[in-house]
Amino acid sequence: MTSFTVDLNADFGEGFGAYAFGQDETLLPYVTSVNIACGWHAGDPHTMREAVARSIAAGVQIGAHPGLPDRLGFGRREMAISPQEAYDYTLYQVGALQAFVHAAGGLLAHVKPHGALYHMANNSIDIAAAIARAVHSLDRRLLLYGQSGSLLLTAGRAQGLRVVSETFADRTYQPDGTLTPRSKPNALLDDTESAIWQAKRMVCNSAAMTADGGETSVVADTICLHGDGPHAAHWAKAIREALEAANIRIQPPTF
């Protein structure tokens, strides 16, 4: 009998100051790795420290979630940055989070770019290479999370990094394996059963649903569970329980 394993990850610590965002505490029991905001698109030194402490206490694997310096747009708007800037931005933010993790007695395991920076790295080999080079320069043992089939994974492999291919349970795909833009029809799966079906297909059949009802090939080493919807914790619980019921092991990637 074929055995399948997958990581469940969620973005974490994306508040700042007096503001909270997402459902951090309710998601923690269902994920095996978290991506902690590093202070630019969200987060600040206080929330970073607290997010690291909560993650260590919960026993989940910790990753850095660097983004663009665009707090007002939550890092979701593309900026005209050079590869050198992408390198500097990544090194700066990941190094800051690594300091908090080290001070708390933990280990930083991975890096996953946030929002527009993530998508820019999917589409530009120069930006992808700069991010991968920054991760390698800081600690070549770190894992690099990137979208299935993306240039970021290609760049990570070229740097000798171990890469983790990410998929999304609540999104549809295009025939070429890219995500359907949120501005397009049928970009989101809006019910729990569809998300569960999608998660199982991605892990067991390396296939994801396209917006037109077809399928495309993906590699699901990890599935992102978004924490910014009202149903986030319910979906995370339902997806994890359904995967475990299908004898799929839920665990973080080896690092």
Image (cartoon, rainbow, N blue to C red):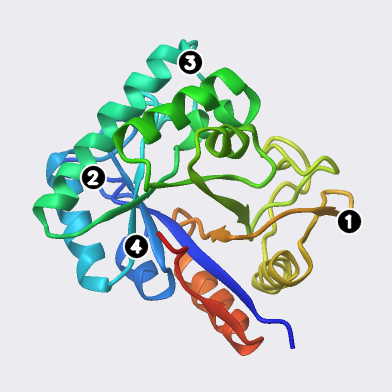
- Front-lying residue, 106 or 186: 106
How far is the residue under mark 3 from the one under mark 4? 30 Å
How far is the residue under mark 2 from the one under mark 1? 39 Å
Let me know if residue 227 appears in the view: yes
Mark 4 crowdedness (10 Å alpha carbons): few <14, some 14-19, many ≥20:
many
- Front-lying residue, 186 or 122: 122
Q: Which residue is mark 1?
A: 213
The circle on residue 19 is: 2
Mark 2 crowdedness (10 Å alpha carbons): few <14, some 14-19, many ≥20:
few
Q: Residue at x 18, y 52 (%)?
A: 101
The circle on residue 79 is: 3
Please tell me whether mark 3 sits on a helix, a strand or a loop: loop
Q: Amino acid at mark 1?
A: Gly
Q: Which residue is mark 4?
A: 61
Residue depth check, mark 2 versus mark 3: number of the one nearer the observer? 3
Let me know if residue 231 appears in the view: no
Left or right of residue 201, residue 143 in this image: left
Left or right of residue 78, residue 25 in this image: left
Answer with mark 1 or mark 4, whichever residue precedes in sequence: 4
Answer with mark 2 or mark 1, whichever residue precedes in sequence: 2
Answer with mark 1 or mark 3, whichever residue precedes in sequence: 3
Mark 1 crowdedness (10 Å alpha carbons): few <14, some 14-19, many ≥20:
few
Q: Residue at x 70, y 37 (%)?
A: 181
